[in-house]
Image: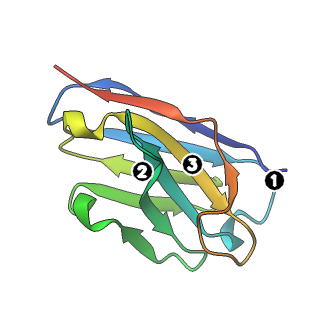
Amino acid sequence: QVQLVESGGGLVQPGGSLRLSCVASGSLFAVYNMAWYRQRPGNERELVAEISSGGVEKVVDSLKGRFKISRDTAKQTLYLQMNNLTPNDTAVYYCHRARFQQPVGVGSWGQGIQVTVSS
């Protein structure tokens, strides 16, 4: 069972930036599709960005230009760079690893990390 451990969250002012990290245990990190999801207060969990095993990156349209997903295979780490944050980005952010050769949405999850955007 993989363990996904997020870090890098916290309190940031509007307009600020944060970089979330997610370290995955186990091996074969590179062969899995991975993603970041978030759950804003009062809302369901939603996809933020995903990156395929082949390195193809996708960010949801509403966050393009501000958020970027990347992965470092050697460090078995997934990243989410978030810029120009707004209070609407306040959420618990989750790291996700899809099942082998499956699209994101079903698989393993981190415990979540809080990001709060407030002045």
Pinpoint residue 90: horizontal percent, then vertical percent: 32, 34
Label 1 sits on residue: 26
| Mark 1 or 2, nearer chain start | 1
Pinpoint residue 92: horizontal percent, then vertical percent: 46, 35
- Marks 2 and 3 sit apart, C-alpha to C-alpha, by 9 Å
Q: Quadrant of residue 99?
A: bottom right
Mark 2, residues whose alpha carbon is within 10 Å: few (<14), some, or many (≥20)? many
Disc 2 + disc 3, Cβ < 8 Å = no
Mark 3, residues whose alpha carbon is within 10 Å: few (<14), some, or many (≥20)? many
Q: Residue at x 48, y 65 (%)?
A: 50
Label 3 sits on residue: 95
Q: Residue at x 61, y 69 (%)?
A: 33
| Mark 3 or 1, nearer chain start | 1
Label 2 sits on residue: 80
**Which numbered disc covers residue 101?**
none
Q: Among all residues in the image, which is located at the extreme top?
A: 119
Of the residues shown, which amino acid type is indicated by label 1?
Gly
Foreground: disc 3 or disc 1:
3
Identify the element where label 2 is drawn.
strand
Disc 3 + disc 1, Cβ < 8 Å = no
Foreground: disc 2 or disc 3:
3
Mark 1, residues whose alpha carbon is within 10 Å: few (<14), some, or many (≥20)? few
- Marks 3 and 1 sit apart, C-alpha to C-alpha, by 15 Å
Of the residues shown, which amino acid type is indicated by label 2?
Leu
Horizontal side, residue 88 vs residue 20: left or right? left
| Mark 2 or 3, nearer chain start | 2
Identify the element where label 3 is drawn.
strand
Q: Quadrant of residue 43?
A: top left
